[in-house]
Amino acid sequence: MIEVYRSSVIAAPAQLVWALIRDFNAMPDWNAAILSSAIEDGPADRIGCRRRLAFDDGSVWVHELTQLSDAEMTIGYAIVGTPPGTKLPMRDYRAVIRLEPVIDGDQCFIVWRATLETDQEAAVRSRAQAVFQAGFDGLKRRFGASRLLKKSATDGR
């Protein structure tokens, strides 16, 4: 079993970022590695619902929502469907994304952690880290731009 871990700080309040992250169908809105998402067995906040994600490499994966806690700002999912003939075979993939407010309240700490089994550890680790980082980069772009606009408005510009 391997673990893939990435963390970052997002320049926005945790509750604001959480409102986007907790939507199990919204990943294409904040992660450029994801082209589309469709909920099956919804709604998108019901444990056990599934989403079909189309990735930028042409693959399509099915994720099942395994946990969702607004109090802990944690969302978890498992891969339950893999594309036929996938170049990066994985088994028992489970992931959790967790947010924590930073002391000043204007930022949050985000952690994305996955555990899985694979026969191609280096390639799978590299791809997963790239997808996680694309998500963090998208969140920074999305919330960085909105914070700058808000700050400009409050500064009278």
Image (tube, rainbow, N blue to C red):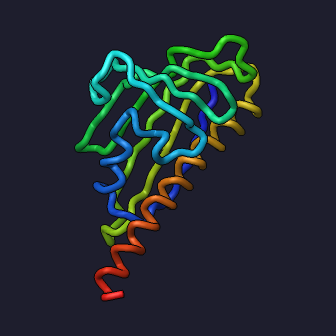
Q: Residue at x 72, y 13 (%)?
A: 85
**Considering only vertical position in the picture, is 119 above or below 129?**
above
**Considering only vertical position in the picture, is 150 above or below 143?**
below
**Considering only vertical position in the picture, is 76 above or below 42?**
below
Quadrant in the picture for residue 25: top left
**Considering only vertical position in the picture, is 84 above or below 22?**
above
Q: Residue at x 48, y 61 (%)?
A: 9
**Residue 48, horizontal then vertical, whole percent:** 34, 18
**Residue 77, horizontal then vertical, whole percent:** 43, 27
- Foreground residue among 77 and 32: 32
- Foreground residue among 19 and 146: 146
Is residue 58 toward the left or the right of residue 78 in the image? right
**Residue 110, horizontal then vertical, whole percent:** 45, 52
Q: Residue at x 42, y 62 (%)?
A: 143
Q: Residue furthest front?
A: 157
Quarter holding the C terminus is bottom left
Q: Residue furthest top?
A: 84
Is residue 75 toward the left or the right of residue 56 in the image? left
- Foreground residue among 41 and 101: 41
- Foreground residue among 50 and 154: 154
**Residue 156, horizontal then vertical, whole percent:** 31, 88
Tally of marks? 0
Quarter holding the N terminus is top right
Quadrant in the picture for residue 40: top left
Q: Residue at x 33, y 74 (%)?
A: 150
Q: Residue furthest bottom?
A: 156
